Image (spheres, helix red, strand yellow):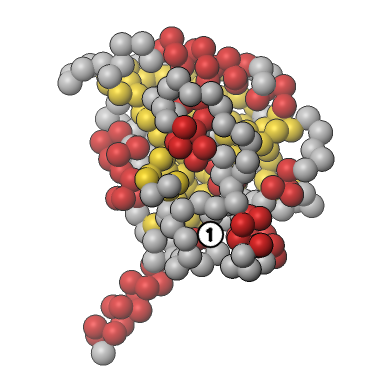
Amino acid sequence: MLGLLLLQVLASCLWLGHSEVVNSFDSCAQFFYDGIPPVIDAPNTNNLARICQRFRNSYRYATLYDGQRRIPVYSAYKYEPGPDEKPPKNWMVEPQLIDRNSFPDMKYDSTLIDEKIFTLGEINETQAVPGDYKGLKDLDRGHLCPSGHQFSKESMMATFTLTNAVPQYHELNGGQWNIYEYRTMQQMAKGCKTTYVITGAVPGNIGISDNRVNRPSHIWSAACCLVDEKSRKAWGVIAENDKNVVESHSLKELEEKLTKLYRGKVTLFNNACTQK
């Protein structure tokens, strides 16, 4: 009887735990500095899913997804820009948010619907879908883990999942945030053997698509650079999601700012990367 009870508890845990949607990030711990995910002790976060973002049988990055607001809390990855051009903007969804026994890889919603695996309604219940972003004015689908920070074509394609996207102010996405992603990051990461990145979104008070998908109030990013076995450097940025302005901060300053915005303690690299 005890063994059966333990199996039932384990099975219930696998809903957050199986991309794969997982109970812990152990399967994709390589995307976190020291293998430890950040701590964001925010209120009203009851429907979170840990996703080891898998595409074509390989893990590409990690995402903590807010199923209630239908936006990611953050995506974590290694900064490894490559020579490939940006792939077509074909956006995918996460089948295991609907059924833990479904495909471990992300899929196109049209494929799931055409093959009668899931209905559009079933997909809608658990996550954002491409239709949520149609006809928007002044907003884009903004990547948290951008395709240009990935080395291979497959890893770049894997960033085009809506579990890795938020409604982002158009001028910011194509303006100062783009400059940070593709110019500033390149400059800051010079001399780094490995650069770990966490990019996240602070939930806002308004939404899109009849309020199905939350529009974040702020978008932020932090990086921890390993220069050698002993030397580390870190930095962070944050932007209000209705202005084309990006503020630069030390890691400590960013964590303090996020702690106020989330109304709960935020620790991004387990206090293991430099706080200067």
- Residue shown at 39% from the left, 66% from the top: 14
> In the visual, does 239 lie left or right of 83?
right
Residue with the most extreme left position: 229
- Residue pictured at 41% horizontal, 72% vertical: 12
Can you give x and y, in whole percent of width and height, for residue 185 in the image? 46, 16
**On screen, 147 above or below 101?**
above
Residue that appears at 72% across and 27% down: 170
Q: Quadrant of the N terminus?
A: bottom left
The quadrant in which the C terminus is found is top left
Residue 56 rendering spot, x and y as whole percentages = 43, 47
Q: Pinpoint residue 48: horizontal percent, then vertical percent.
A: 50, 55
Work out whether residue 4 or residue 110 is closer to the camera in this orientation and state it: 110
Closest to the observer: 108 or 178? 108
Residue position marked by numbered label 1 in the rendering: 95
Sort mark 1 into few (<14), some (14-19) or many (20+) by Cα contacts within 10 Å: many
User: Is residue 35 left or right of 82 when viewed as pictured?
Assistant: left
Amino acid type, label 1: Pro
Q: Nearer the viewer, residue 187 or 155?
A: 155
Tell me which residue sits at (35%, 79%) in the image: 8
Mark 1 element type: helix
Residue placed most toward the observer, 52 or 104: 104
